[in-house]
Amino acid sequence: MHSKSEADRLNNGTFGILEHIANLKMLAATDEKDLIKPTEVYHAILLMAYNEGEDVLGPSIEAIKKSTFDCKKIIVVLGYEERGGPEMENTAKKLQAKFKKDFYEFLAVKHPDGLPNEIKGKGPNLCYAGRALKEFVTAEKIPMEKVIVTSLDSDNRMSEKYLDYVAYEFIARPNRQRLSYQPVSLFMNNIWEATAPMRVIAISNSFFNIISTMRPHTLRNFASHSQPLAALVEMDFWSKRTIVEDGHQYWRSLFHFHGDYDVVPIHVAIYQDAVMEETFLKTLKAQFIQLRRWDYGASDVAFVGVRLFSRERKKIGQMKFLPLFAKFWRLLDGHVMLAAMSPIVAFGGWVPRLMNYDSKNLLTYNLPETVGVVQFFASIGLMATIIVSLKMLPPRPPESKKISRITMILQWLMMPVIAIVYQSFCAFYSQTRLMLGLYMEKFDVTKKVVKKGNKS
């Protein structure tokens, strides 16, 4: 028996009870041939690697092994690059031998270097591993429409309940083959070891990802995500020609399925590393390179715009103009604001007065005060972020100094500089390259550094 307050929370759907009951009723009314039983679902994990060692890949595989989903229904595919050299191949074979008995199967798939029509990046590796998975599933006579594929980077450690949540959403939705499933990416694996500027960026990105899952109508694929194998096979897996294959996958899927495609938020975390190199200066550079690569997702503006405004739009996507225009506008607005917002808030209020100091225009005179009000409310939001971020932190490692908790607060004083240098300038850099035709043809891999004594 629940107390009245508990019953009220259940009745208003706080814990998803009403949604769950609705799902059960829907499943009860569904034709049996269209149902998928929980025991029939398989998960395939595509774990991508370049030249990472066992100290990085091992914990990621251990996290999969700890899943509450039946490991004998999990197929792990470690896709590694030939460019990683003999050491990477030895690591892959060693991990395969170590974990092979823990899963339905553990495949180590080497992606050859120099294949035609491919950039040097993660997308081609994903495609190659995906095709190997398809061959394996076909040979094992596992129905492809019952296999969910999750792509992971080498440092990604999924929550133990993630696969269960995805399986539930997959079973409960009749249009399951036209959906992808997006977890919350939290950059918290090594947050106590990372330098202060990188911690601010990692926590800020984590907050952005949390907020994104609360706005399903704007949600797109980012980093790790899950998608049915049958859908991936139909659309030939991922793009082999783009640097930002995760976000681009949303648009490829949307157009391939003629608008009949959506992203389901999964409110469970997949934990990733904050950027960390051997030295402070190398770390600063590596963070800039990572963010400029993410911001190169602005290339999707042209990809979507051509299909939106083309006379052949209906043939390409069979999509109505206004819904697609709304998606296009949010995409364009997001990239423009990413580059412009921080400098505008920091300096925009003073520019008109400095340009024409003698102006008597009321707007010119009052603009700095108006921007000051915006900055005040932004500061309140920042304070809330600081408080919540302290609650989000994993337990402090024994080797981490107690003063680290103080620096976790003081580090936010750098936020204005970080926002301009690492948010706005990285976006401006990538967008300028696109404008000038200086396209990125190579995926800059973020090096994974594990400090001694911290291999968990």
Image (cartoon, helix red, strand yellow):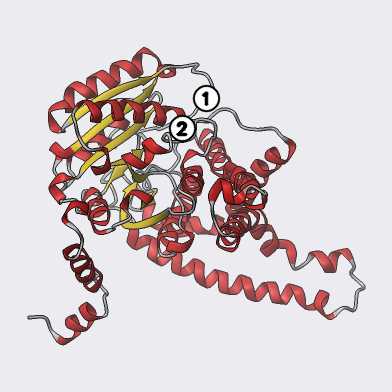
Distance from Cα at disc 1 to Cα at disc 2: 9 Å
Kindly check if marks 1 and 2 are in contact, taking CB atoms under 8 A apart as contact.
yes
Horizontal relation, residue 449 to residue 136: left or right: right
Residue denoted by label 1? 118
* Amino acid type assigned to the residue bearing label 1 in the image: Glu
Residue 278 visible, this angle: no
Who comes first in sequence, dot 1 or dot 2? Answer: 1
* Amino acid type assigned to the residue bearing label 2 in the image: Gly
Res. 206 image quadrant: bottom left
- Residue drawn at (38%, 39%) of the image: 232
Image x and y of residue 11, in percent = 22, 80
In the figure, 80 relative to 315: above or below? above
Image x and y of residue 136, in percent = 25, 26
Residue 56 visible, this angle: yes
- Residue drawn at (21%, 27%) of the image: 106
Res. 408 image quadrant: bottom left
Q: Quadrant of the N terminus?
A: bottom left
Q: Nearer the viewer, residue 257 or 201?
A: 257
Residue denoted by label 2? 123
In the figure, 173 relative to 101: above or below? below
Q: Nearer the viewer, residue 343 or 440?
A: 440
Q: Nearer the viewer, residue 123 or 187?
A: 123
Classed neighbour count for the residue bearing mark 1: other residues with Cα under 10 Å, few (<14), some (14–19), many (≥20): some
- Residue drawn at (49%, 55%) of the image: 411
Horizontal relation, residue 251 to residue 162: left or right: right
Q: Quadrant of the C terminus?
A: top left
